[in-house]
């Protein structure tokens, strides 16, 4: 996408008393396209969950492989089990598909209309009505610009506050006002969703009366973050590893005491550790001129992994790390929010001091942490490469 | 004069944070805060014997919250006074 990429984020609130969400978000990424489907199944609980899961899975898979929309909708209609109570098979859906020609295609069936924020302001986009198998589907094709945010939601968002804070819920216009007021140019897809979902949760008095999901695609310029952890197995590779760290053209992170000393030596700059504990569990950070962030190694990365898991399984709203200053939270901000492309440079030297049965640190654990973190970051939609030294 | 306290992985797990707190408190009590800076260090390479503290040319190993006062009096204070 000409230096642009699609960042995906979503947040769901589950109706009070239910264990399963009746809304479902499915994303499919290929080299040249990103597809997101939000489906809202009829009713709530298990039944709604099955309907929306089938709908989103079928549409996302078919759309992503280039099937015409009519075909996808027909397949869904004919596949869904029919509800015994209501005698219909029904799930609403919104499809957002952005391709490498910088074109966003929207297909909307009975969900609240997609909001397009450009430069922080909601704008109108062309809409064409298709009738497929008796269903009215609204189709739009929009040429995207950097930092465009396409935001879709289930109707639970509109019902928030009905009979409590607002008589009739807050309308799409209220949501637009709310979002515009909180817009910042670096607002991520996930944060945009979180802002709306948190407000819905508040309006529902923390007991949602309906499943509520907000999902967004943000068009953004690529940003590389390179992270080096561990000294190379052979010291003669030190120089090469540091060069690879620096030639990513984006931001740089160095993790680990020995590794930081090595980088400082290669760059011929002092390593200046701090003794400020922003979080008692996380060792303090350090500074090396020319490196954006210097932290301790395994303990910090172990914590980043924990944050990453929480963020990915995200149906919760906790993004406390976004405002914190400890090493792990700052790595999280760089990797989860800022980065689109992540390069891990992993040294495989064994720290003899860590091969001590008293310490929960070993080379095996370190490698496992990086592998697992890389996998989760890929699931977040990041392009991740790992090179070993 | 600088006192370096290791905050690398091993030393962190062995209690760097409480050693830093004890050190700050003790330096105040000895009225040395004008002469002594407490700094962090990213791994001194003695991970098996943490927490490591370096004062001048001397490295003091195996410091922890329990033995802090003893280590300070026998191995650290002398270095600070010599200066």
Image (cartoon, rainbow, N blue to C red):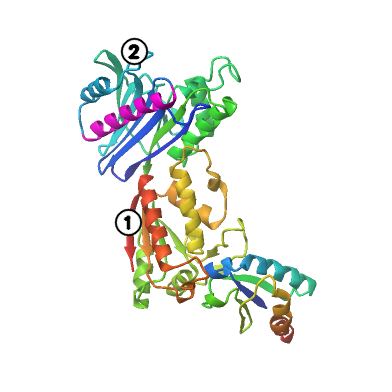
Main SS of residues in magenta: helix
Q: CA distance from mark 1 to mark 2?
A: 50 Å
Q: Is residue B51 left or right of residue A123?
A: right
Residue A143, how many percent across, how many down?
30, 31
Q: Mark 1 sits on what residue?
A: A385
Per the rendered image, the range of residues in magenta is: A44-65
SS state under label 2: loop
N-terminal label among 1 and 2: 2
Q: Is residue A326 left or right of residue A54?
A: right
A204 or A97: nearer the viewer: A204
Residue A156, how many percent across, how many down?
47, 23
Specify whether residue A51 is painted magenta. yes
Q: Where, quadrant-wise, is the N terminus of chain A in this rendering? A: top left
Circles 1, 2 touching at the beta carbon (< 8 Å): no
Q: Nearer the viewer, mark 1 or mark 2?
A: 2
Identity of the residue drawn at 45% across and 21% down? A155
A249 or A350: nearer the viewer: A350
Residue furthest front as drawn: A84
Please rate how many residues cluster around mark 2, counting C-alpha atoms within 10 Å: few if below 14, some from 14 to 19, many from 20: few
Q: Mark 2 sits on what residue?
A: A87
Q: Give the chain letter at badge 2.
A: A
Q: Give the chain letter at badge 1.
A: A
Q: Is residue B44 at all visible to an observer of this figure?
A: no
Q: Is residue A87 left or right of residue B71?
A: left
The image shows residue A179, relative to residue A244, as above or below, that is: above
SS state under label 1: strand
Tally of numbered discs: 2
């Amino acid at each position: 996408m000409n230096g642009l990429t699609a960042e995906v984020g979503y947040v769901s609130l589950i109706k009070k008393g239910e264990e399963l969400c009746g809304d479902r978000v499915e994303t499919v990424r290929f080299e040249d396209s990103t597809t997101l489907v939000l489906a809202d199944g009829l009713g709530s609980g298990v039944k709604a969950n099955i309907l929306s899961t089938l709908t989103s899975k079928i549409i996302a898979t078919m759309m992503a492989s280039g099937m015409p929309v009519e075909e996808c909708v027909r397949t869904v209609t004919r596949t869904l089990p029919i509800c015994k109570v209501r005698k219909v098979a029904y799930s609403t859906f919104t499809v957002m598909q952005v391709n490498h020609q910088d074109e966003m295609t929207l297909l909307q069936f009975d969900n609240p209309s997609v909001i397009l924020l450009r430069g922080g302001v909601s704008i109108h986009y062309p809409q064409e009505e298709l009738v497929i198998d008796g269903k009215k589907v609204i189709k739009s094709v929009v040429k995207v610009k950097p930092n465009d945010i396409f935001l879709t939601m289930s109707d639970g968002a509109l019902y928030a506050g009905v009979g409590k804070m607002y008589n009739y819920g807050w309308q799409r216009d209220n949501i637009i006002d709310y979002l515009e007021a909180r817009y910042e140019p670096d607002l991520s897809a996930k944060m945009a969703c979180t802002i709306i979902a948190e407000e819905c949760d508040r309006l529902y008095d923390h007991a949602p009366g309906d499943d509520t999901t907000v999902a967004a695609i943000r068009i953004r310029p690529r940003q590389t973050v390179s992270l080096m952890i561990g000294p190379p197995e052979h010291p003669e590779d030190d120089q090469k590893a540091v060069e690879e760290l620096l030639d990513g053209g984006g931001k740089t992170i160095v993790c680990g005491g020995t590794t930081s000393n090595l980088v400082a030596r290669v760059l011929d700059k002092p390593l200046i550790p701090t003794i400020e504990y922003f979080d008692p569990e996380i060792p303090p950070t350090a500074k090396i001129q020319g490196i954006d962030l210097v932290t301790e190694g395994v303990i910090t990365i172990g914590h980043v992994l924990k944050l990453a898991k929480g963020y990915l399984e995200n149906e919760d709203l906790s993004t406390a790390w976004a405002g914190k200053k400890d090493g792990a939270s700052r790595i999280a901000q760089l990797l989860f929010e800022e980065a689109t492309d992540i390069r891990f440079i992993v040294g495989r030297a064994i720290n003899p001091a860590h091969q001590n049965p008293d310490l929960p640190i070993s080379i095996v654990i370190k490698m496992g942490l990086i592998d697992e973190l890389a996998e989760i970051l890929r699931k977040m939609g990041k392009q991740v490469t790992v090179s070993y030294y | 004069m600088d006192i370096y306290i290791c905050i690398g992985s091993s030393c962190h797990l062995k209690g760097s944070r409480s050693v830093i707190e004890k050190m700050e408190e003790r330096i105040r009590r000895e009225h040395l805060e004008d002469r002594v800076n407490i700094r962090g260090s990213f791994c001194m390479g003695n991970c098996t014997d943490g927490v490591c503290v370096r004062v001048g040319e001397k490295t003091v190993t195996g410091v922890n919250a329990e033995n802090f006062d003893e280590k300070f009096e026998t191995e650290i204070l002398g270095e600070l006074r010599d200066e």
